[in-house]
């Protein structure tokens, strides 16, 4: 088991307008479960392949423990990978992972070959194939993508629990931010080859460093309202969010983005935004109201209510943000503005 360190690590492809991974500096602690997440093309899988030795590194270094593995062959890095495609051996039985069959609850399937196993069972066998090698680092590249929704939830819980039991440093790639937030000790968010933020799931949710992370983390996504800074504050139609002197000083233009998560978008505010309810999603424990502001009919604002909602599509509501839960970003750069002093 070892820590992993990327130092200004870059990877570029011929004829590409930008690096696939651009000067990545990231330290992963010994035994940590770190998730790389981001949209398609952000560089997360390339980063994993650079660590595995499957992609050359054009600049910077990668260390596993105290060893510089930048130029080492994959077989010399003491890593084990779990792929989306399982990467099983069709001519072998699960008995090859007998040492961990009990740990993975696979004992009754020891005489079966991969073709006779379910998706979830195949994924556990792939985990076993990696575990029996006793590597320094586990690398997992979207291992749950082929599973149905119910099995994904079950398997991600098993993988997270197993990693904590084994204590092996793990780097996990996914495009699913819910998966990332529920599994990782920390989550690294990438966009266009650049690391945007690496923090605990709670810190990412509560204090995103820019508007991209704010909009990417959370389901449904944070409401991102394009406002204009005036003497009154950040204005979005009839809704006004006050700005502190420090926030005004940090702005590079009059453009301000106000971020409000659905659970912080309150209904029945005394002063707020008149909106028409377009759709109501009732999930039992929660209801999500998708609303079109009267003054901004091209936009959609989402509000969450606990339990079943008495509001119906077609009704008009007044929306207003919880002042204590508002996120403010520079509209031009996307950077987070200074927090309001408490």
Image (cartoon, rainbow, N blue to C red):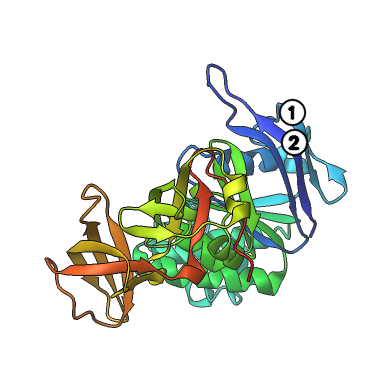
Left or right: residue 79 compared with residue 326:
right
In the image, what residue occupies the spot 40% across and 48% down? 227
Is residue 251 left or right of 118 when viewed as pictured? right
Q: Are marks 2 and 1 in contact (CB under 8 Å)?
A: yes
Q: Position of residue 40 (x, y in %)?
A: 45, 41
Secondary structure under the numbered disc 2 in the rendered image: strand
Q: Residues within 10 Å of mark 1 (few under 14, many from 20)?
A: some
User: Residue 327 or 117: which is nearer the viewer?
Assistant: 327
Q: Quadrant of residue 284?
A: bottom left
Viewer-nearest of discs 2 and 1? 2
Q: Is residue 73 above or below residue 135?
A: above
Please report the residue visible at 63 percent of the width from the left and 71 percent of the height from the top.
342
Front-most of residues 327 and 126: 327
Residue 218 occupies which quadrant of the picture?
bottom left
Q: Position of residue 209 (x, y in %)?
A: 59, 52
Confirm whether residue 95 shows in the render. Answer: no
Instruction: Name the residue that disc number 1 marks.
Output: 59
Q: Which residue is mark 2?
A: 8
Q: Nearer the viewer, residue 220 or 154?
A: 220
Residue at image position (49%, 77%) is: 108
On screen, 213 above or below 121? above
Residue displayed at 52% across by 50% down: 329
Q: How many marks?
A: 2
- Residue extending farthest left: 314
């Amino acid at each position: 088991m070892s820590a992993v360190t990327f130092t200004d690590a870059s990877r570029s492809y011929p004829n590409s307008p930008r690096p696939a991974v651009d000067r990545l500096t990231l330290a992963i602690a010994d035994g940590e479960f770190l998730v790389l997440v981001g949209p398609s093309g952000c560089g997360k899988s390339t980063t994993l392949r650079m660590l595995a030795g499957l992609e050359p590194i054009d600049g910077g270094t990668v260390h596993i423990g105290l060893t510089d593995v930048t130029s080492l062959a994959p077989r010399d890095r003491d890593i084990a990978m779990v792929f989306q495609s399982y990467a099983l051996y069709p001519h072998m039985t699960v008995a090859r992972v007998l040492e961990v069959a009990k740990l993975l609850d696979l004992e009754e399937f020891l005489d079966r070959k991969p073709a006779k196993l379910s998706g979830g069972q195949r994924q556990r066998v792939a985990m076993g194939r990696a575990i029996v090698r006793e590597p320094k680092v586990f690398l997992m590249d979207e291992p749950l993508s082929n599973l149905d929704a119910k099995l994904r939830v079950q398997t991600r819980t098993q993988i997270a629990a197993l990693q904590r039991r084994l204590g092996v440093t793990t780097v996990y790639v996914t495009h699913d931010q819910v998966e990332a937030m529920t599994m990782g000790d920390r989550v690294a968010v990438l966009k266009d080859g650049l690391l945007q933020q690496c923090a605990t799931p709670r810190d990412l949710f509560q204090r995103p460093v820019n508007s991209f992370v704010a909009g990417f983390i959370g389901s449904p996504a944070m409401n991102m309202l394009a406002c204009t800074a005036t003497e009154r504050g950040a204005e979005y139609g009839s809704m006004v969010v006050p700005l502190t002197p420090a926030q005004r000083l940090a702005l590079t233009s009059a453009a301000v983005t106000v971020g409000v998560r659905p659970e912080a978008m309150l209904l029945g505010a005394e002063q707020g935004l008149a909106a028409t309810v377009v759709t109501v999603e009732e999930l039992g424990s929660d209801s999500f109201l998708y609303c079109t502001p009267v003054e901004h009919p091209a936009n959609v604002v989402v509000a969450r209510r606990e339990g079943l909602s008495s509001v119906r599509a077609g009704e008009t509501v007044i929306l207003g943000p919880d002042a204590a839960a508002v996120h403010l970003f520079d509209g031009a750069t996307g950077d987070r503005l200074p927090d309001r002093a408490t």
